[in-house]
Image: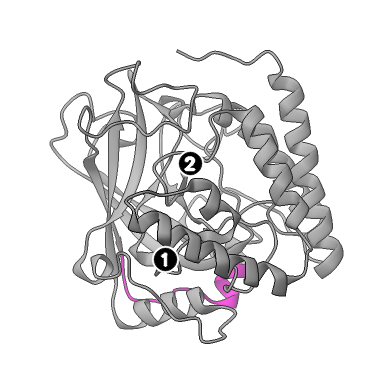
Amino acid sequence: MERMEENEQEVRRELIETMRSIQETTFGDSGHAVRSVHAKSHGIVQAEIEILDGLPPELAQGLLAKPGRHDVVMRFSTNPGDILDDGVSAPRGLALKIIGVEGERLPGSEGDATQDFVMANAPAFVAPDAAHFLKTLKLLAKTTDKAEGAKKALSTVLRATEAVIEAFGGKSATVASLGGQPMTHVLGETFYSQTPFLYGANVAKFSVAPSSPGLKALEGKSIKLDGRADAHREEINAFFAGSGGEWELRVQLLTNPETMPVEDASVIWPEDESPFVTVARIVAPRQDGWSEAKAAAVDDGLSFSPWHGLAAHRPLGSINRVRKENYESSVAFRSQHNGCPIHEPKALNSAE
């Protein structure tokens, strides 16, 4: 099922070096260490996940093996490694940390009680494997610390380019990743794991999709920047000031290895062969959608990694294999330079 690339160790080393260079650049600018990717949080939301009762055996696996409820931390972000004005649009991310999870653990997460999911708002990854992702990351690394005004101008052009592509029924992951992400509401996005994972005895991809009317109304809804550097935070705060929201956690099982490869993360698994199926609901009450206090606790005090979790959901494929050491390196840099211990919470209040 998995096939390690011949140069994977070298690619892993170069990825760590490239991500470290991004962190060193941003730390030199601000004096504060942030993530090498998805540095800027736009929403930090406390929620609860309810695992559905009566799932069929092929879906009742790992975290979803039995019905129950767990606390969740949701972190909405965009992918650059520097904290940018929202006029620079970029792909969006959603990281979930599910707390109080029992079961056999993945290597490196022994003794923890969390299950993380790291997602983005596209069904497939921007690169097929780690080697190709390294090339993309090096391009992004070169833009770190460049003049923000130039980035905003380029982003405006790329958004227009993406709009033309979409008008003809297409999408460009490359254009979006370089600053052409349409300026729509983050809470209206559907997020995808993009890469595959073990799912007990099966293999699957995950997705989180808005399900409550208020969130579904935001799907594809444009927002106006009006010069707001933190427009996404303001929009998320405005939403959660008035209401809560609900999402569905969905699973897409691998049913055809020919059309659903494990090693090529750039391939969209066809939903006509294996549709996403809802396995849990995520419910968030009214709250501050983002605050300085939440950011201090979650942005600085927590880390999110697909390697935090159960052995039943082991990350698969080239992209996931190189993530483990890269994420660990990023966490170590933040902890060392900020003097803030990064931990795995045992309860929601310890994540605050």
Q: Which segment did they paint magenta?
A: 284-296
The residue labelled by disc 1 is 186
- Answer above or below: position of 295 versus 105: below
- On screen, residue 131 versus residue 262, left or right, reads right
Residue drawn at x 49%, y 47% as measured from the top left: 173
Q: Position of residue 295 (x, y in %)?
A: 59, 69
Q: Indicate which disc residue 55 carries.
A: none
Residue 136 visible within the image: yes
Identify the element where label 2 is drawn.
loop
Q: Who's the residue at 67% across and 67% down the image?
A: 151
Q: Can residue 288 be seen in this view?
A: no
The single residue placed furthest to the left in the displayed view is: 54
Q: Which amino acid does label 2 sit on?
A: Ala
Residue at image position (59%, 26%) is 321
Location of residue 325 (image quadrant): top right
**CA distance for labels 2 and 1:** 28 Å
Crowd around label 2: few <14 · some 14–19 · many ≥20 (10 Å): many
Is 259 positioned to the left or the right of 342 in the image?
left
Which residue is identified by label 2?
Answer: 113
Magenta span includes 42 = no
Q: Where is residue 323 in the image (x, y as percent from the top left)?
A: 62, 34
Amino acid type indicated by mark 1? Val
The quarter of the rendered structure image containing the N terminus is top left
Q: Give the vertical position of 249 relative to 78 (above or below).
A: above
Q: In this view, does 215 lie above or below 121?
A: below
